[in-house]
Structures are given as structure tokens and as C-alpha cells.
Image (spheres, coloured by chain):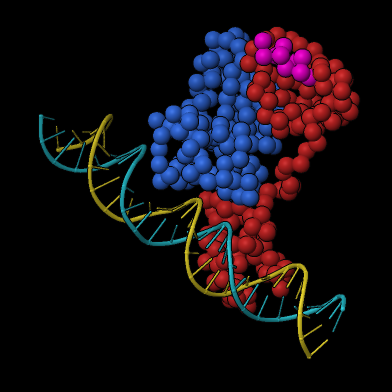
Chain colours: A blue, B red, C yellow, D cyan
DNA sequence: TATCGCGTTGCATATTTATGCACAAGTTTG
DNA sequence: CAAACTTGTGCATAAATATGCAACGCGATA
């Protein structure tokens, strides 16, 4: 599915430099996503990625075009990936965006969220237990696609 | 001269979106800089510009990205002690050094590390589970000795 | 002056990215 | 149920970008 692939792309980009769409294609293939360069060109457009001296990158927090901070927006723009460790979620964001993202999260009064702590590019979300963490993780993963 | 042209390019980019090198070439020509697309490709490389959904853009806020001190250095200099709490590690550093230490940790892309959050003299490191945390703790303890 | 060295550029072309068109699978509408 | 529409994709190819190579301009040196 397209959304899973988009998530995988974000993940890959956060792990190391990707210089061309063909390189991205090969990396994705190793993860089971077998698509053509044409599709990736479209994905990159969808994800509004930037290409620079060090390859592709996720859009950059501060500047830019359009921002009103709803949770959806903030996530789509600055969220990179969610990972779970028992009752905690670790959310990676573009550098410098962890604080606003955490603020948006707090502001929503999501029941699963006991509290958040934000660094520079990482938000730690504490949940009641593993079960609540899982359900929240799924919701957040969906938001990453939007 | 190349430098004047570089300045003109920055200027143009701050004034409005530039979507292709050929468009840039035409805009520059109107200002008296008559060069080919090939030259602009080199200029863009020199200036480390990024291309994104809205065309070319100057590099992000605070410039340079990858020359952080090595993990070994940072640890030997600023690391004080590591402690483990189930799947988390709490790393004490000299006051004010937590941020750079966390940055160095993130930059290494250590697989056990889901994410880090740094305060002033404390870095919280989140791992997948207790097992990963232990193995990472041992590695970090080694670094503290070095 | 002649020659060298170095930085800059254009030309031709290789490489990379974007896109028109067609089609398949799923959804909605009549 | 069938037709119309939507969405996602590949293929072929257009468009955009990068680069090997040769040449030019200019200052330094013999």
C-alpha cells in the first residue's frame, strides 16, 4: 500500500542519506516494496520532500509555506516515525520540531497520553500501559500518512 | 565573476520561487549574467541549495550538518555515569553537556537507541526493551572508561 | 615574451527526475 | 448489474540536472 511505503521512505531517510530515486528504489525493494522510479517520483512529490547536497530530506520545520498547527498538520509536516517500547512511544520529528509537536499532542488531551517530554527531534510519550501505547501508536501512524 | 553571480542567485531566490535552472538562467540573463544551465548546475552545487516543492531554496537556518565530535570523545569528556531503568538508560553528564552528547548519540544511529531526550546534565535514552538497554549500557560504560 | 598553472565556462552528453497515457482494481452511481 | 469514476501503478519518454572534456582568460614565473 502507498501509505506503508511512504512510511518506509520516511524511515529510510531518517536513517541515512538517499541520493537518487533509483537508490531509494533499491533500498525499498530490500524491504519488500517493489515499485518503479516513476512511482517514487510521485511519492516524493506527495511527501513534499526536498533534495539537497546530502540527498533527499524531510521538509524543514521553521520556514516555508503553510502552517496552522492542528495535530494532523503538525504530524504530517514534522512527524517522521513512531516506535514503541512497552508503554512508551518514541516519536521522531524533524530537528527542532519536537517541542511544537509535543505541545500539539498535549493540547488534544488524548486519553492514552499520560504525558509527553520533548527534546529537539524526539518526543517521548508516556502511556498507561503497553495496550494503550499500541492503540495510540496506530493512530499516530495513520496521522503520519495524512 | 562567479561570486557576483552567486549573490545574484541568492537575491533572486529571496524574491520569488525559482523552479528550474533554465528559469534561473533567464532571470539572471535579465540582470546581465549570461551563462548556461551547466554553469548554474555547478553554482547550485557550490551554494548547497536545496530543491523542493516550491523550487530552489537556500540552505536551512544554521548551516552545516555533519561534523560532530565522535561519540568516544564526547563520552570521555562529558560522560559521568550510566544507569539503567528497565528499557531506559539515564546518562549523567557534566552540566550543560547533555545536548551535545545526545546529538552525538543520535548521529551514530545506534540500533538499540530508539531515541534520546536531553536536559541540562541528563540524557534519557529509550531502548526497545530491557535486553537492548543492557547491552547498550555495557557499551557506554566501556566508553566512559576510555 | 613564452610558458605554466589554475579557476571558470560551454558544449555535448550521461544521468536523474517528471509526466502523458493506458490499464487494472476498487468504489460509487444510475 | 452495468456504467462511470477514482486511485495507484508501469511504461515510454520528455524535461531537468549533472558531468567529462576541451578551451579560454589571467596572473605568476622563467
Q: Residue at x 63, y 29 (%)?
A: A92
Residue A126 versus residue B100 in the image, above or below:
above
Asked whether residue B102 is drawn in magenta, I would say no
- Residue B60 appears in view: yes
Q: Quadrant of residue B3?
A: bottom right
Residue C22 versus residue A32 in the image, above or below:
below
Asked whether residue B136 is drawn in magenta, I would say yes
Residue A122 versus residue B67 in the image, above or below:
above
- Residue B15 appears in view: no
Q: Quadrant of residue D7?
A: top left
Predominant SS of the magenta segment: helix
Residue A13 versus residue B50 in the image, above or below:
above
In the foreground, A73 or A54:
A54
Relative image position of residue C13 (x, y in whole percent):
47, 64
| Left or right, B28 with reference to A135 | right
Query: In the rendered picture of this protein, how many numbered marks are placed on residues?
Result: 0
Q: Quadrant of the C terminus of chain B?
A: top right
Relative image position of residue D27 (x, y in whole percent):
82, 77
User: In the image, which residues are magenta?
Assistant: B131-140
Q: Quadrant of the N terminus of chain B?
A: bottom right
Relative image position of residue C30 (x, y in whole percent):
14, 38
In the foreground, A105 or B21:
B21
Amino acid at each position: 500500500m502507498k501509505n506503508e511505503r511512504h512510511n518506509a521512505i520516511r524511515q529510510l531517510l531518517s536513517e541515512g542519506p538517499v541520493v537518487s530515486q533509483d537508490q531509494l528504489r533499491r533500498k525499498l525493494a530490500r524491504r519488500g516494496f517493489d515499485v518503479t522510479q516513476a512511482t517514487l517520483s510521485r511519492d516524493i512529490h506527495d511527501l513534499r520532500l526536498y533534495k539537497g547536497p546530502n540527498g533527499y530530506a524531510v521538509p524543514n520545520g521553521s520556514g516555508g509555506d503553510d502552517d496552522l498547527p492542528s495535530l494532523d498538520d503538525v504530524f504530517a509536516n514534522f512527524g517522521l516515525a513512531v516506535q514503541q517500547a512497552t508503554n512508551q512511544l518514541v516519536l521522531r520529528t524533524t530537528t527542532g520540531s519536537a517541542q511544537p509537536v509535543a505541545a500539539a499532542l498535549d493540547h488534544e488531551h488524548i486519553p492514552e497520553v499520560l504525558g509527553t517530554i520533548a527534546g529537539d527531534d524526539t518526543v517521548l510519550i508516556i502511556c498507561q500501559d503497553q495496550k494503550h501505547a499500541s492503540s495510540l501508536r496506530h493512530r499516530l501512524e495513520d496521522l503520519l500518512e495524512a
